[in-house]
Image (tube, coloured by chain):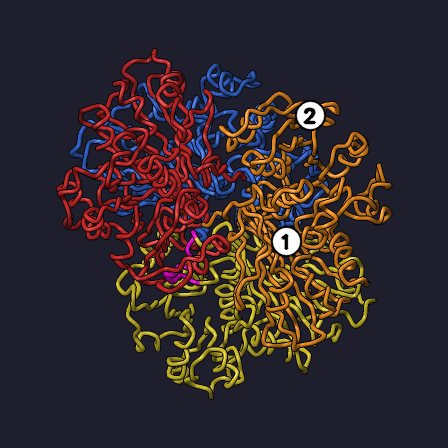
Chain colours: A orange, B red, C blue, D yellow
C-alpha cells in the first residue's frame, strides 16, 4: 500500500482526489492538511465521502508528510514550491496539482504567476505529467507537475497534428470552454450561481496562464516555435471542458482519423470517436477519459478537433492518480475504472 | 458469474443499469434487447460506456432471455407483465424496474395504470424490493418489484415513525422534488430543456401513481390505514430526489435522531445525518445511498424529515442491483461502492 | 416625476429595482448610494443597464437623500432602521426592501434578527406593503415595509382560506422553494455555482425568519393564532419561488376555485389559474405576477395551493414599485407591464 | 396601428414575437395561425401571456392574412415560400423569420436546405434584414428575410473588420455557442433536459446552414471571397449566443476599439463595450442588443471579437420587430426598450 498525504484538500480538486483515493485498492490515505478546516472530518465537509473515510483535516505538519511515500499538493499556486524541496530530500515523491512546476522557464513562470519561484532548481527536474507524452519520465520522477485542465484537453487534441508537422504552427487556435468548478471553491461574487448560471462568456482573452503552458508542450512536440491563440470561456455547468481546436493543414490528403487512432491506440484514457462524431462533456463526467473527434469542415484545408475531458478528473485529480500509478509501478488504470455518469 | 439479461435498455434507467453492471464483478451481461435500437452497440447510444462493453442491442428474443439467470425489465409500464410468466416458468428470476408488480391489489393497480393486468396471479408472489423492509423475502424471491423512485425516498423517511406508531397516520404529507431524468428519455415537448430549464413547478397534484404505492408500503408498516397527501415537483436538474415529509407527533418526547439511527444502523445504504443537517441531492449523485435528516421545527409537535436519493440509483438501477445481490447471495453492496460525484 | 433615491443598490434586489425604475415613466432616479462601489457607474456593474442610465454610485449622503420624494432601502437587514427616522422627519417617504420594519412585535423581531431595533417607535407606524391586504394603508404610508419573498408567495396563497375560516389554522404547512438569487449577491462558498448547481436541498428547517413574518400576516387575516410549519428549499435556478401550501379543510363543500377567483378578481398582479393547472415559475420570470392554482388531491379534505412569483419582482423590487405607485397616486401597474420571459 | 398576422406561432420564436408585440404601442395583432393548436388561446399555451392577449390560434386562413398590413412567418423552413407570393400580391408586407429568403443564390439555398425553392423569383427582391447593413433597403422592402441567429452575432462582429479590409478573409473562424432554445420547441430526444443539461458539445462541424448565410453577408461587405470556418456549440442554458471570432490582421496598428465604436455609433442596438471587457449573454437576455468586445491576445496579430445576443431577440423576434419598425416608419426602437434580465 502506498502511503499518501494530501496538502490542501478543501477545494474541488481536493474532494475529487479524495473520491478517487478512498476506493483506490493500493492506496492508504495517511494525512490531509488544511489550515482552515483543521479538526473537521473530510466527510463533514464533503458528505459524499460519508462511509468511505474517517479522516480528519489536520494542521500542516512536515513530520507527518515526511512519513508518506507520496504527497499530492492540491493547493493554490505558490504553496507547493515552498514545501517540495524538503519533502524530496526526505525521500517523499510529490505530485503538484497546481502550476508551480509546469513551466520550465523560470522567467516565463514568474511573469505569468506574478511571484518569485521558491525553488527554481527543481523546474528542470520536474516532469510534466502528461502520460501520453512523458510516460517513461513520469515513472522515474520524484516530482511530477500535473498538467492544467485546459492544457490537457488542448495538448491531446493537437499532439498528433503537431508531432507530424501536418499543420501551420504559427497560427493555432484553441477555443476552450469550461464548467465553473474550474474556477475553484473560493468565496467570490464572480462565481456565484446568480452570476454564472444561465449565462455564457469568454474571459481572459488578452492572455491566460494556460497559454504558455500549452505553447511549451506543443513546442516540445514539434521542436519549434508555436503561435497559439487561446481563448477560454465559462459554461453554466459544473464539470467538463470542451476544446475546439483549429489549424490549417499543410497536407490535405492525410487520413487524420487514422492518424489519431494510431497515435493513441495504446492509451488507456484517450478515446478517438468514430468519424463524424461530436463528443459531449457528459460522456466523460467523473471519468478519466479524453474523448476526441476530428473534422475537416466543408472538406477544406482547416482541421477542427473537438476534445472533451472532465476538468476535475483527466484535467486534475484523475490524471494525478494516473501519474501516481505510473510512479509506483501499478496498472495505469488502477482505481480509475469509473464509468462516466450519463445522464 | 450471474448471467444477466436486460429488456429495454434505451432509457435512463437502462443506461444507469448498464453503468453499474459493466463494472460489477459477479455479473456477465448476456443480452440487452430493444426494438428501436436493435443492431446498434450500447456504446454508440451511450458513449460513456465506450471501452466497457461491446454489447449490441438485439431484438427481443425469448430463447436468449431464457438462458439468463436473471432478467431486468427496464421497460415502460405494462411490458414486463406480458413476458414475466414464461421467464419464471423457465427458471429465470426477474427484477422489474417498472411498476407492473408494485401494487398487490389488482383493482387498485388497474385503476391507476389504466390497463388490465396480464398476470394478476403473480401480484401476491412478487416481492416489493425495498431491502430495508423486505430483505429476507427478496433473498428468496423469483420476482422482485423494484420500488418507484419517489416511494423509496418517502418510505425510508417515514418508516421509523410509522412502524413505531409515533405520528398521526391520517394526515401525512410528502412534498417531493425530482430531477428531470425521472421523466424518462422519450421525445416530448414537456421535458425539453427549453421547457424545464430554469423553472420549477408542482405537477400531478390531483393524484400520482406513486401515492398508492407509498400508501401500501406505509400501511403494511403500521398494519393500518394511511392518509397521505403526495405532491411531486420538477427540479431543473438531471438527477436527484428530495422528499420533505411532514407528520404530527403523538409523543413529543421521543428521541427521533436515535430512533432513526437505531432503525438503520445495519443498513449499508441508509445514512442518518447528524442532528441539524440538511441533505443535498448531490451528496448521493451516482451513488446508492439514501441520506436522511430529522427535524422538529421551532421545537413543536411536527416532525419534518428530509430524505435524498439519486432517482436513477437508489431510486431505480442501484436498488435493482442491490436486490440482485441479495437474490444471488452476494455481498449486498457488491458493485455498488461508487462514491457520489460532488461537485 | 417622483424624485427617487436608492440606498445600497449593488445586490440583486438593487439591480432589479434599477431595471424597473430606468423605464418607469413617472420616476426620476436622483441618487444611488454604495460604499463599496462609489464612483462606479451602475452600468459598469450591471451591463444590462448600458444605454438606460448614466447614474453612478455615490457615497451615502444624507443631504442628497433628503432631496428625494422617496427613498428605497435595498440594504442588508439592520441598515434602514438607522437612517429612516431622519428621512421621515425631512418629509421623505421610505420603502424598505429589507426586514427592519416587517415585524411589529419588537421582541419577536429582535429575537429573529439578533440585534436591537434602532427605532422601535416606527414599528407600529410602518405599513406592511402587501397591497392585496393593505392597499389603503399603503397609499397613506410614510414608511412601507416591503414583504419578504417567501412571505409574499405564502400569504397570497393562504389568505382566501384563512380570511374565511375554511381551514384548520393550527397546522398549516408551507413547503417553499426558491432560486438562488434569493440568497443575495455576496461572496460566499455556499452559493457558488459549484455548490448550488445540479443539486437540491431543504435548509433552515429548525426555523427561518420568514416564519414569524408569515404567521403575523396570517394571524391578522383570521384574528387568531396560527400554527405554521415553514420549510424553505434551494432550487438550482436563478429566479423564482414556488410555494406548496397544505391545510385541512373544515368544510369540503366550498368551491375553492371560485373563492380564490373572487378574492383576487380586482387584483392587477394576482392571477388564479384555471382549475387543474400547475403554475411554473418561468411564467412569472421578470414579471410582477403571483400565479396560483388550487387543488384537492384525491378529492379529500386537504387543500393544496401552488403559488409562484419571481422572488426579485413580486417578491422584492416589483412589489416595491407597486407600493411606490400606490403611495404616489399613480396607476398601480405603472412601469410594471413587463411580460414574463418564457422560455 | 399596424395590423399584424403571425403564421405559426407555437415555437420559441413565436412566443417571443408575441411577448414583444402584445406590448408594442403601434401594433394590433389580428391573427395567429397554427394547425396543431387551432382553437387554443395563446395564453393557455404560453401562460406568461395571461392578461396580455385574448387571441386564439386559428387555422391558416389566407383571407384573414390578406387583411393584415404585415405578416410574420415563424414557421419551419420551407413554409413561408409557399404562401408569400400571394400575400405580396395582395399588398401585404412580409417578414420571414425562417430561412426561405436568406440566401440569394437559388442553387446554394437548395443545396443546404434540401428542397426546391417555391418562388425563386423573389430571392433577389427579398431584403436581408440586418438593419446595421441594409437599413434603407429594409425601409422600402415588401419582403424581409430576417437573419439567422448565429449569422446576426457573427456578421455584426466581423463587419467593421471586413468592410475595411483589415483582416485576411481567406481564413476566418467563428466559434459560436448557443442556448438550447435555438433548437426549437419540437418533441425530440436530443434536446431533452436529460440530454442537454450539464453538458457541452460542438455540433455540425462538417457543415451548418448558417455558414453560407454568413459567407454571403461577409462577401457582400468586402465584395470578395470569404473563407469561413464556422463551428456551433450547444450551451446548457436556454437563451443566448456568444460568438468568438478570429481573424489575422493585415495591419496591427489600427485602433480597433475606435473602429468598432465609429462603425456602430448611431446604431440603437449594437453596443461596443469598453476596452478589456468580456460580454456575457445574460447582459442581453430578453433585450434586442448585440454587445461586442474586441481584443488582440498577447498583443499579437490576431484579432478576437466576442459578440453576444439573445438568440430569440436580436437573433429572431426582436430583430423582426426592429425590421417592422423600419418598414412602417416607426422609431426603430419602438416597443423594444426591454432591459435585459440580469441576473
Span highlighted in magenta in the image: D184-194
Quadrant (top left, top right, bottom left, bottom right) of the N terminus of chain B: top left
Q: Quadrant of residue C248?
A: top left
Q: Nearer the viewer, mark 2 or mark 1?
A: 2
Residue D313 shown left or right of residue D175 in the figure: left
Q: Which mark is residue D278?
A: none
Q: Nearer the viewer, residue C301 or A222?
A: A222
Residue underneath mark 2 = A35
Residue A98 shown left or right of residue B171 in the figure: right
Q: Nearer the viewer, residue B207 or A221?
A: A221
Instruction: Tell me if residue D136 can be seen.
Output: yes
Residue B203 shown left or right of residue D135 in the figure: left
Residue underneath mark 1 = A233
Picture coordinates of residue C195 (x, y %)?
54, 37
Picture coordinates of residue D273 (x, y %)?
68, 56
First in sequence, mark 2 or 1: give its number: 2
Label 2 and label 1 in one chain: yes
Residue at image coords 14%, 41%: B106
Q: Nearer the viewer, residue A143 or A311?
A: A143
Please report, as a chain letter, where disc 1 is located. A
Picture coordinates of residue C99 (x, y %)?
51, 27
Please report, as a chain letter, where disc 2 is located. A
Q: Is residue D144 above or below residue B171?
A: below
Amino acid at each position: 500500500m502506498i502511503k499518501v498525504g494530501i496538502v490542501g484538500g478543501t477545494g474541488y480538486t481536493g474532494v475529487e482526489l479524495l473520491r478517487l483515493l478512498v476506493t483506490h485498492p493500493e492506496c492508504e490515505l495517511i494525512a490531509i492538511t488544511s489550515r482552515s478546516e483543521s479538526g473537521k472530518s473530510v466527510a463533514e465537509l464533503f458528505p459524499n465521502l460519508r462511509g468511505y473515510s474517517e479522516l480528519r483535516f489536520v494542521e500542516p505538519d512536515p513530520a507527518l508528510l515526511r512519513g508518506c511515500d507520496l504527497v499530492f499538493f492540491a493547493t493554490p499556486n505558490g504553496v507547493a514550491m515552498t514545501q517540495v524541496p524538503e519533502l524530496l530530500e526526505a525521500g517523499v515523491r510529490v505530485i503538484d496539482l497546481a502550476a508551480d512546476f509546469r513551466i520550465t522557464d523560470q522567467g516565463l513562470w514568474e511573469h505569468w504567476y506574478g511571484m518569485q519561484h521558491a525553488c527554481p532548481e527543481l523546474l528542470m527536474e520536474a516532469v510534466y505529467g502528461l502520460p501520453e507524452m512523458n510516460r517513461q519520465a513520469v515513472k522515474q520522477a520524484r516530482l511530477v507537475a500535473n498538467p492544467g485542465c485546459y492544457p490537457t484537453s488542448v495538448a491531446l487534441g493537437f499532439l498528433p497534428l503537431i508531432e507530424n508537422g501536418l499543420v501551420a504552427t504559427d497560427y493555432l487556435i484553441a477555443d476552450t470552454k469550461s464548467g465553473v468548478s474550474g474556477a475553484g471553491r473560493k468565496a467570490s461574487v464572480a462565481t456565484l450561481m446568480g452570476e454564472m448560471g444561465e449565462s455564457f462568456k469568454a474571459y481572459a482573452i488578452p492572455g491566460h496562464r494556460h497559454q504558455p503552458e500549452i505553447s511549451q508542450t506543443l513546442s516540445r512536440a514539434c521542436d519549434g516555435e508555436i503561435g497559439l491563440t487561446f481563448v477560454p470561456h465559462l459554461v453554466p455547468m459544473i464539470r467538463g471542458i470542451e476544446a475546439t481546436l483549429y489549424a490549417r493543414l499543410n497536407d490535405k490528403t492525410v487520413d487524420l482519423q487514422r492518424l489519431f487512432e494510431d497515435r493513441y491506440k495504446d492509451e488507456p484514457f484517450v478515446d478517438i470517436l468514430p468519424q463524424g462524431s461530436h463528443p459531449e462533456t457528459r460522456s466523460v463526467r467523473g471519468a478519466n477519459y479524453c474523448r476526441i473527434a476530428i473534422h475537416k469542415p466543408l472538406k477544406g484545408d482547416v482541421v477542427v478537433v473537438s476534445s472533451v475531458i472532465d476538468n476535475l478528473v483527466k484535467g486534475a485529480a484523475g490524471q494525478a492518480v494516473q501519474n501516481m500509478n505510473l510512479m509506483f509501478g501499478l496498472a495505469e488504470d488502477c482505481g480509475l475504472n469509473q464509468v462516466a455518469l450519463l445522464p
